[in-house]
Each structure stands twice: as structure tokens, then as C-alpha cells.
Image: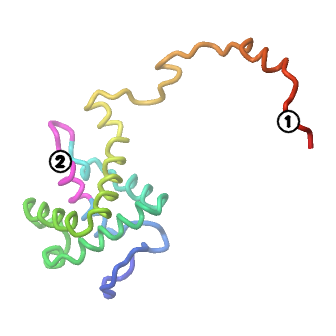
Amino acid sequence: MSSRKNKGLRIMPDKKNKFSDLDKRNLKAIMDRLIPPVGELPGAGSIDLIKEVEKMSFEHDRFKKSVFLFLEALSLDMSVQAFGGLMAIPDDQKDNIISEIETVLPEIFKNFLEVVYLAYYQDTAVHKHIGWATGPLQPNGFMLQKFDETILRKIREREPFWRKV
């Protein structure tokens, strides 16, 4: 990531397309607040979805911009700066920080939340917990009838209606 000396918005990550260690810790804390633990299933941050969020962020410009602007807005919060990240901040204060960012940057927050949801619902442990079938639907899912080529017979008998070039 760009250095913290420059207080301007940092939209672009470092050259390695990776989150900084601080960003990863902050993301885990935020993700656990957005999707908290349910029963024995840990929260989204504790499932270790950072690599998936990172991958989606670097593959899709809309997500890249939103994730990094979200992280930048987070880093500008005085509480986050005072504690050196979100990990030491009480949960209710984390929720207030998230709400502020959502209020001030609604489109950025919406895209950030979408990345978190996409990563979360791609995880096989989540699939198992909510009872989703995991893996390809074919051939173990809905069976397709074998293709009947006789339906193309009439089409093949027609004269071409295009001209050869």
C-alpha cells in the first residue's frame, strides 16, 4: 500500500496487488461485524476470506476502487488511528465507524459489502451450514436429456439464405 505519510486518498494498492497486513487485520474485523458468527460457523472475517476478497478486488475495477476507498475512509477515522487499527476497538464503536462510512460513502459501502457477501457465500463451510449443494450441478444434479439431432433435419434441408463471400 502507499505510505500513510500521504493523507490523500489512496485508490491504488502496492505493485504486488496485495493488501497490507494492517488492511488485512482491519478487513477481518470489519467482515466479522458485517457477517457475525452464527452457531458454530465463525464470522466472515474469521473464516479467512481475505484472499478471496483480495482476488475479487484486483480482478474487478469497481470492487478495487470501492475496497480501497473503504479502507482509506477507515484509516482516516480518529479512533482507528489512535488504536492502530480496528482490532482493539470495542464492537459497538466498530459498528459506529461502519455506519458512518455507509452514510458518507453509500455506493462505496454497497460495493464493499457485495465483495464481502460474494466471498462469504462462495465458501464451502457456509454452503454446508446453510444446506446449499456444493459443487457442480452436472452430472450429479439435474439430468439433461440427450440431444436429439433430428430436430435440426428441417433446418439442414433448407437452402442457405445468405450469400457466400
Residue 38 magenta? yes
Tell me which corner region of the image, top left, top right, bottom left or bottom right, holds residue 79.
bottom left
Q: Quadrant of the C terminus?
A: top right
Q: Position of residue 95 (x, y in %)?
A: 13, 60
- Closer to viewer: mark 2 or mark 1: 1
Q: Which residues make up the magenta segment?
A: 28-41
Numbered disc 2: secondary structure: loop
Q: What type is the residue that disc 1 sits on?
A: Trp
Judging by the rendered image, the residue that carries numbered circle 1 is 162
* Residue at the limit of the structure toward the front, as seen here: 161
Mark 2 or mark 1, which has the lower sequence index? Answer: 2
Identify the disc placed on residue 36.
2
Q: Quadrant of the N terminus?
A: bottom left
Residue 105 magenta? no
Identify the disc placed on residue 21.
none
In the rendered structure, the answer to whether residue 75 lies left or right of residue 9 reads left
Q: What type is the residue that disc 2 sits on?
A: Pro
